[in-house]
Image (cartoon, grey):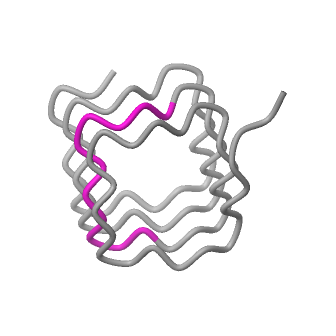
Amino acid sequence: MGGANLTDADLTDASLKKADLPGAHLDRAKLHRADLTDARLTGAYLNSAHLTDAKLNRAHLEKADLTGAVLIRADLTGAR
């Protein structure tokens, strides 16, 4: 069973605090400056996602695929 399909979505500056996105497909998504604090991204696909300046504080990233993701200045404080 897959999660939400947000492939290629433009989520620049989005507030996704505490979002529940396990298994979501966020391949190539634009998440510049997005706030993903406390988001549940377990098993999510973030291949080549653009996470420049994103807040991923305490995000649940267990088994997430971040292959090729751009994490320039992303805040991963407390992420797992």
Residue under the point 35% across and 38% down: 39
Look at the picture and state if 23 lies above or below 15. above
Residue 35 in the image, given as x and y percentages of width and height: 25, 58
Is residue 75 rendered magenta in the image?
Answer: no
Q: Is residue 39 left or right of residue 38?
A: right
Look at the picture and state if 3 lies above or below 27. above
Q: Which quadrant of the figure contains the C terminus?
A: top left
Residue under the point 35% across and 73% down: 32
Residue under the point 22% across and 53% down: 55
Magenta-colored segment: predominant secondary structure: loop
Q: Residue furthest right?
A: 1
Residue 14 in the image, given as x and y percentages of width and height: 33, 70
Q: Is residue 32 left or right of residue 9?
A: left
Look at the picture and state if 64 lies above or below 25. above
Residue 74 in the image, given as x and y percentages of width and height: 25, 55
Residue under the point 37% across and 57% down: 71
Magenta-drawn segment: 31-41
